[in-house]
Image (tube, rainbow, N blue to C red):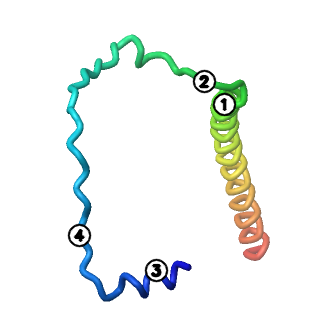
Amino acid sequence: MIKERYSELSGKILHDEELPQQSVTQKTFKLPIEKEKEYIYLPSNAEAYFIINSFRIQELENQTKFIYRIAGSISTLFLMQVVISLILLIKK
């Protein structure tokens, strides 16, 4: 059906139809009050849980990064100690 309509209109010059003028009424828009910007309105509990959990996840990620840094430092020191001990054993 679409192909038939396309082939029917393909050779014609098309013009936009003019719509009757509707009366234009000016609408006034209120700017939001600054206090309203401070609140977050959540339509469902699922969105509230998502926001709360996202803060918890960020906190856990920061704690894990800290733990990885400490573990990396300790393993680096241990590796340096092993290398120094091997060098000392080889020199004897």
Q: Nearer the viewer, residue 16 or 63?
A: 16
Q: Which residue is mark 4?
A: 15
Q: Which residue is mark 3?
A: 5
Label 1 vs label 3: CA separation?
47 Å
Q: Which residue is mark 1?
A: 47
The answer to whether residue 35 is left or right of residue 66 is: left
- Alpha-carbon neighbours of circle 2 within 10 Å: few (<14), some, or many (≥20)? few
Label 1 vs label 2: CA separation?
6 Å
Q: Position of residue 14 (x, y in %)?
A: 26, 75
Quadrant containing the N terminus is: bottom right
Q: Give the secondary structure at mark 2.
A: loop
Q: Give the secondary structure at mark 4.
A: loop
Q: Amino acid at mark 1?
A: Glu
Residue at 29% in and 18% down: 30
Q: Nearer the viewer, residue 77 or 63?
A: 63
Residues marked 1 and 4 touching at CB (< 8 Å): no
Considering only order in the chain, which callout, 3 or 4, is on the residue closer to the N terminus? 3
Considering only order in the chain, which callout, 4 or 1, is on the residue closer to the N terminus? 4
Q: Position of residue 36 (x, y in %)?
A: 41, 14
